Amino acid sequence: MLVTAQEMLQKAKAGHYAVGQFNINNLEWTKMILQAAQETKSPVILGVSEGAAKYMTGYKTIVGMVKGMIEDMNITIPVALHLDHGSYDACLKCIEAGFTSVMFDGSHETISENIEKTKRLVKLTKVKGLSLEAEVGAIGGEEDGVIGKGECADADECKMIADLGITMLAAGIGNIHGKYPENWAGLSFTTLDAIQKKTDEMPLVLHGGTGIPAEMIRKAIDLGVAKINVNTECQIVFTEATRTYFEDKRDLEGKGFDPRKVLAPGCDAVKEMVKEKMTLFGSVGKAE
Ligand code: 13P
């Protein structure tokens, strides 16, 4: 069932668990994530970056693919189709194409520009009944080979954005995209706590879900995180399993050139990893 992220996040907040956002890059991963969610009865959010959308030929293709899969695979659990880190223009395009949820990443703009654009998108998404994620305090990550330190958002700025009427808020708490460096200081729970206290019941989003230790994830959920994004880990497990497949030369002597066979170990690895995350986030069985 294709829905917005609104209700699933409210339920997650009330039930003290988090809904996983898994980023898709192709048909295979989408299928595996949907299977994992259906088999574990977990609500799920399919994340799409602007780059991944370009790779998959565009937003309309993605909407068509996801809608078709939900029908053909008899997916009954709630699924949200969400733009990840979108520009203002990308948000407009996704709303037009039929996404049920968008993230406007105004964290690189001044706070007043971020507020202005978020405000406009609140209006638009409310009219269409869609969910909207906003961001304060850039989430670090690798840029030009340099891994940036995770920023911590200002709680007062978070309140200003949260009060605009958004569905969920991504706020930097020392988290970064991609692999964490060995000297990573960890998540700032003081920042998370301060942000949640200022923003009342606002569902908070934890980006950079790859490689955060389980106990930190659990503590973040306790303190108000209701959505956790995972992207890099899908890529890592898929590529590792695919490499292993190619190392097994015997397979290439048989029917090993069949793309369905070549991609199968990677797909299985993605599905297994998604199920593990859903268990850790506590969303298993919540879509019964
Ligand atoms: P990772 O790539 O670190 O898992 O982060 C995903 C993310 O936050 C997407 O917005």
Image (tube, rainbow, N blue to C red):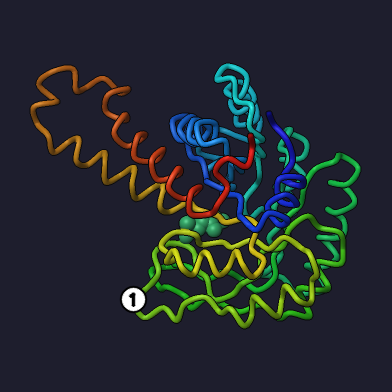
Place residue 273 in its image quadrant: top left
Q: Position of residue 243 (x, y in %)?
A: 22, 42
Q: How crowded is mark 1: few (under 14 residues within 10 Å), some or many (20 or more)?
A: few
Residue name at image x 39 percent, y 47 percent: 235
Q: In which quarter of the image is the N terminus?
A: top right
- Asked if 58 appears above or below 225 in the picture, the reply is above
Identify the residue position indicated by label 1 in the image.
Answer: 182
Q: Relative to 119, is 94 above or below?
A: above
Instruction: Pick whichever, 194 or 86, lies toward us.
Output: 194
Number of dots carrying numbers: 1
- Residue that appears at 67% across and 39% down: 80
As drawn, is 4 to the left or to the right of 44?
Answer: right
**Residue drawn at x 63%, y 32% as measured from the top left:** 77
| Rendering coords of residue 237 (x, y %) | 33, 47
Residue 43 vs residue 105, the one in the foreground:
43
Residue beneath the point at 42% across and 66% down = 213
Residue 287 percent location from the top left of the image: 64, 37
**In the picture, residue 96 is in which quadrant?**
top right
Q: Is mark 1 within 8 Å of ligand 1?
A: no
Residue 182 coordinates in the image, percent (x, y): 33, 76
* Image quadrant occupied by the C terminus: top right
Q: Residue flagged by tag 1: what amino acid is it?
A: Glu
Label 1, secondary structure: give it. loop
Q: In this view, does 9 lie to the left or right of 19?
A: right
Q: Quadrant of residue 155?
A: bottom right
